[in-house]
Image (cartoon, rainbow, N blue to C red):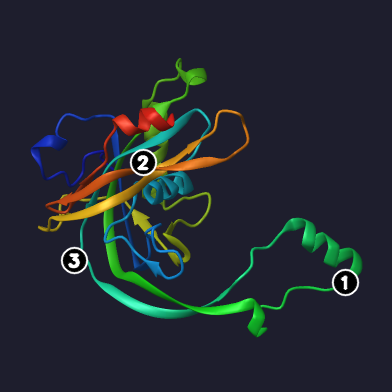
Amino acid sequence: MKSLAGAGSSDQAGVEGWLAVKVWGDLACFTRPEMKVERVSYPVMTPSAARGILEAIFWKPEFRWRVRQIEVLKPIRYFSILRNEVNDKMVVSTARGWARNGGGYYADQPQHRAQRHTLALREVAYIIRAEQVLAPHARDVHPAKYRDQFRRRVERGQCYHRPYLGCREFCAFFGPSSPADQPIKHSEYLGQMLLDLKYNSDGSGEGRPVFFNARLENGILRVPQDLYKEIGR
């Protein structure tokens, strides 16, 4: 796979460090965080979802992924579904108590489930273009090593776990891009979109979301790189 396969615009030229992977699937839902109860998807994959797909394919502590842009290959189509979902989150300590004293959680009981509406996407396809940023302890490693490993994994269909399109039940397929893969001719203001989480430096594991003003220009969502420096990626 060539790192710039399918590049169709002049601003994509001369970026040797970028890698590309084509992902597609039947269903997708990239939930807007302002929707508290019902799930409503962004029209386009978010950078954080793209990073999750890249890490599912290839991850090492020696580098981190920085998404540069996402290209939409198919027209944006919505559909709505109703799903039965559980109301509570599983807590490890509670499960251990059941193991010792008996009991359990039954999702089919009315008090534990609720029917929620989801406005999702159907028949989606994207090209994710990203770069690998080496960690400080890996500065003596040539970055081409990890780029080649990623390309081989994409060509062979290898992944650490199955990537998904926003929700785990919406599995994603992936493979190399080709010159025939071109973004759609559609532009739209997408509003405030989640870039990623900025984690606290105290090691608590808590993070806060970082947003940016997103716009789809001729089928391409460009990610502001200055915000990655803010969140330390």
Say which mark, if any, is on residue 77. Answer: none
Q: Tell me residue 226's x, y (percent).
A: 30, 30
Of the residues tagged 2 and 1, which is closer to the observer? 1
Alpha-carbon span between mark 3 and mark 2: 27 Å
Residue 93 falls in image quadrant: bottom right
Amino acid tagged 3: Pro
Q: Tell me residue 135's x, y (percent).
A: 47, 24
Q: Is mark 1 on a helix, strand or loop?
A: loop
Residue 173 falls in image quadrant: bottom left
Residue, x 40% and y 39% (percent of image)? Answer: 150
Q: Is 177 located above or below residue 145 in the figure?
A: below
Q: Give the residue pinned by disc 1.
A: 102
Residue 233 horizontal side relative to residue 16, left or right: right
Q: Nearer the viewer, residue 120 or 63?
A: 120
Residue, x 71% and y 59% (percent of image)? Answer: 91
Of the residues tagged 3 and 2, which is closer to the observer? 3
Disc 2 residue crowd, few under 14, some 14–19, many 20+, Cα 10 Å: many
Tell me the quarter of the image containing the N terminus: top left
Alpha-carbon span between mark 2 and mark 1: 49 Å
Q: Give the residue pinned by disc 3.
A: 75
Disc 3 residue crowd, few under 14, some 14–19, many 20+, Cα 10 Å: some
Amino acid tagged 1: Gly
Chain-order first, disc 2 or disc 1: 1
- Total marks shown come to 3
Q: Tell me residue 78's x, y (percent).
A: 27, 72
Residue, x 40% and y 47% (percent of image)? Answer: 48
Q: What element carries label 2?
A: helix
Q: Give the residue pinned by disc 2.
A: 151
Amino acid tagged 2: Arg
